[in-house]
Image (cartoon, grey):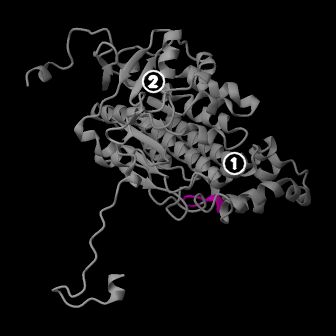
Amino acid sequence: MQVCGLWPFAVGTGTPMVGVPIGLQLFTGATVCADPISWFQDANLISNPSVFVLGLPGLGKSTLIRRMAAGGAGMGNLPLVLGDLKPDYVDLIAALGGQVITLGRGRGHLNILDPGEATQAAERLRLAGKETERQQVLADAHARRHTMVSALLTILRKQPPTDREESILDAALKVLDEHHNGVPVLGDLLQVLRDAPPEVRAVALDRGDRTRYNQITEDLEASLISLTSGGRLGETFAHPTDVPMMRDRPVVYDVSSIDDTDVDLQAAILLACWSAGFGTVNVANALADAGLEPRRHYLVILDELWRALRAGRGMVDRVDALTRLNRQRGVGLAMISHTMSDLLALAEEDRMKAKGFVERAGMVVAGGLPAAEMPMLTSAVALSRAEQELLASWQDPPAWDPVAGRETEPPGRGKFLIKVGGHPGIPVKVELVQRELAVNDTNKAWRPMAVPPLPTAGAASGSTSGEDVA
């Protein structure tokens, strides 16, 4: 009862005591505190407020990030889960009083041409006499929408749009911004393309020939028709946004209804959620810089990163553009994948860029990994021989308990090695407290369901027919 009042202890224990308490040092039992925002902002232990988590499935990667997110929320850092595929974070965000936005086929829409709160923020900045900041907010919104349209085309075609098509899209979006009333959707962009305004024809280089223009834009028009008429990606992005994202509460995009076999839609929705999230963060920062709102810090969680990277050529560049400026934007970033093989199983021109996600991370947290992963991992993170052997031992399968008649807990569950640069790693065991168990139950689908007993014939409440019993 008394010791808890002394937390955090003034005397060091050889492990960092700044940030979210995540567990005990595996060999000494010392408390370990860690999260990317605290280690960057308060402790100056890392140069980039980001963490990359690697580990085999079922060993607790999402549990670790949920602990960081919950503890960070208590410190005032709002967690943003921009695409929850399982779902692993819905219960946590709901328990924190946050916003749960559901997306999927027949389960909501996310308009990638919606500038979000950028338009309102730009007006507030204009009234405050912040013209430069206003222009920056509008330019960011334009670039984000352009990037997302290009990303959807990349997923749809399995290759990025051409330079000419990129220029045509840029000009068409500017026409929409100048002449369209209200929030445009992809159908409006398609109509601009068909109307062939002079600004668009100029960058299309049709040489004054409308027939030539139609030939130049035919492939682009066909792709936009597919995006607006329920093609392979459905109509998720073709209608107005159902639930606008809030910037003053924790948020999770629940996309767990999308089947794992629907790879293209998964990747498209993840990118759209990431784009919407970073757009909201940019608006919040712009208003805070102008003194119009309090400063907010966010922990942006990008889970199942490998799914988006494998969607097609050029996707690594799209993700890189969204994530590279997290320090300047004032956000912490948590990226989660299974193994280095996930990142390196890409087109040759994308491998080094994907590897850079790990190399640029302020801290790398590794769970159980196969020994075959070590050469690839050590090419990005310095690991001693003992550290490599420790990670390999955590990926061993669980033993069989003959007394209980079931498998014991896997030896690597909840165990992680925290690496920062060339410093020795910190092995830690994450232990959940009672209040966390409910929001960390990711096996609800396997829990036995209570089945009410069937009514018996001749019950006191009256006779029951055989059909009713069935």
Q: Residue at x 41, y 54 (%)?
A: 445
Which one is closest to the eye, mark 1 or mark 2? 1
In the picture shown, does residue 25 fall above or below 337? above
Query: Going by the image, does 164 lie left or right of 365?
Result: right
**Quadrant where the N terminus lies?**
top left
> On the image, numbered disc 2 is attached to which residue?
49
**Residue 90 at x, y = what percent?**
38, 48
Q: Main secondary structure of the magenta part?
A: loop
> Residue 317, located in which quarter of the rendered image?
top right
User: Element at badge 1?
Assistant: helix
Most foreground residue, 148 or 57 = 57
> On the image, numbered disc 1 is attached to which residue?
155
**Residue 358 at x, y = what percent?**
56, 24
Most foreground residue, 361 or 134 = 361
> Residue 93, located in which quarter of the rendered image?
top left
Whether residue 373 is visible: yes
User: Element at badge 2?
Assistant: loop
Most foreground residue, 372 or 434 = 372
In the picture shown, does residue 199 fall above or below 320? below
Q: Residue at x 36, y 38 (%)?
A: 402
**Residue 6 at x, y = what percent?**
14, 18
Residue 380: in magenta span: no
In the picture shown, does residue 88 fall above or below 102? above
Q: Amino acid at mark 1?
A: Ile
Q: Amino acid at mark 2?
A: Pro
Q: Residue at x 27, y 34 (%)?
A: 74
Q: Look at the image and give the residue range highlighted in magenta.
A: 181-188
Q: Give residue 378's mark.
A: none
Contact? badges 1 and 2 (CB < 8 Å):
no
**Residue 127 at x, y = what percent?**
43, 43
Dot 1 or dot 2, earlier in sequence: 2
